Image: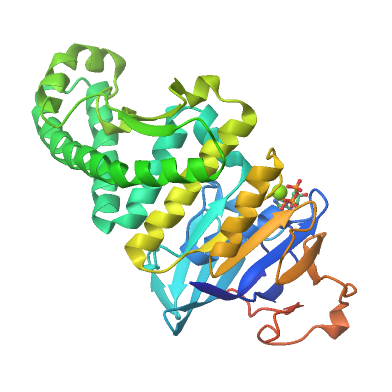
Amino acid sequence: MRLDSLSTLNYRNLAPFTLAFPAGVTGVFGENGAGKTNLLEAAYLALTGLTDVTRLEQLVQQGETEAYVRADLESGGSLSVQEVGLGRGRRQLKLDGVRVRTGDLPRGSAVWIRPEDSEMVFGSPSGRRVFLDSLLSRLSARYAEQLSRYDRTVSQRNAALRGGEEWAMHVWDESLVRLGSEIMLFRRRALVRLNELAAEANAALGSRKPLTLTLTESTTPESYAQDLAARRAEELARGSTVTGPHRDDLLLTLGGFPASEYASRGEGRTVALALRRAELELLAERFGERPVLLIDDFSAELDPVRRSFLLELAASVPQAIVTGTERAPGAALTLRAQSGRFMPEGSAVQDRSAVQDGAAAEDGTAVETELPPVAGVGA
Ligand SMILES: Nc1ncnc2c1ncn2[C@@H]1O[C@H](COP(=O)(O)OP(=O)(O)OP(=O)(O)O)[C@@H](O)[C@H]1O
Ligand SMILES: [Mg+2]
């Protein structure tokens, strides 16, 4: 997978631009608040259609009402254009000019590694579930579908519990058990390979403590129906569904102890890195192509061994964008970030009169350009 160019308009603090990215590593460096993370966030959104920001307005430049990102991609010898328009609470996706849903975009196009990934290790189970569920949803459209049906069922069942509709429970339980069991079985199967890949990555990162991933399940497919019946009174009292895969955890054990409680900050970031590399390998195995790798803040919290692992990882994929407050060594192109603009190393800030129209320059340099107005965001 290759990102030929990325364009943004009204995206957070970024000046409107089209940036051409060469194969290999592009390093982006600049001071705090320059827009490095925003650039990667925009690239991830354009590549996958995904964002973890719940209030989409946050992504739109203050004072504006709509934002737009576009990725020109190359995959298996063919070119495609993915566009995302953001309006108030709305996200519109287009693939080659045709409106599509997130599931219609290629699902293995990017992996994003960032310092916040440590929250997967130290934070609540929900962060680990999000990691697992979003990865499995990308590996399998069926999983994505069943998971969203399951989540809907849980919400509707919770409403019925709050309304004291005990008489309706057998209907909700039937769907919950059917969908939930499929989710549990899928997770168990995927975890076998995920575990191998994460353990491998953890060792490659120089960690002498073995890493294992285990599902902590609140129930099993075999006992789900009985477990629901056994906790009926409690569920009616609390008005919520307390058993099922939406309550499960992915236990991360480092050197025999739960990483969430015992790992140091740097060890935690290493575990998170191992999970991301496992994600990258799984997507590559599933789709037969290595994703574009986006690495935010390559030096944050990492010792020189882990730092060079990250840089080697970046060099092992066809294309990576690596940000930091310092220059990433060995980059094919280095961009300096400043106030939402990105200049090739060595060049001066481009003034607006020198702006080139149309597509990005072909020699892998950055040019700024005006984009067409966002047509019909949220229409
Ligand atoms: N919707 C928005 N409109 C305008 N500016 C925004 C918006 N959202 C965020 N910003 C600003 O964008 C700037 C750049 O943020 P970003 O996180 O990309 O910085 P960074 O280069 O990654 O910095 P650091 O090195 O600290 O991680 C911040 O000053 C932030 O306040
Ligand atoms: Mg940042």
365 sits left or right of 224 in the view: right
353 sits left or right of 95 in the view: right
Does residue 355 appear in the picture of this structure? Answer: yes
Model colouring: rainbow
Quarter of the view holding residue 295: bottom right
Compared to 149, does 258 lie above or below? above
Compared to 253, does 97 lie above or below? below
In the image shown, does 215 or 103 lie closer to the viewer? Answer: 215
- Whole-percent x and y of residue 341? 79, 66
Does residue 376 appear in the picture of this structure? Answer: no
In the image shown, does 69 or 132 lie closer to the viewer? Answer: 132
Q: Please name the residue shown 45% across and 80% down the image.
A: 97
Q: Please name the residue shown 85% across and 79% down the image.
A: 352
- Whole-percent x and y of residue 337? 79, 61
216 sits left or right of 355 in the view: left
Q: Please name the residue shown 80% across and 48% down the image.
A: 32
Compared to 117, does 278 lie above or below? below
- Whole-percent x and y of residue 240? 29, 23
In the image shown, does 244 or 89 lie closer to the viewer? Answer: 244
333 sits left or right of 314 in the view: right
Q: Please name the residue shown 48% across and 64% down the image.
A: 291
Quarter of the view holding residue 374: bottom right
Quarter of the view holding residue 19: bottom right
For the image, the number of numbered tags is 0
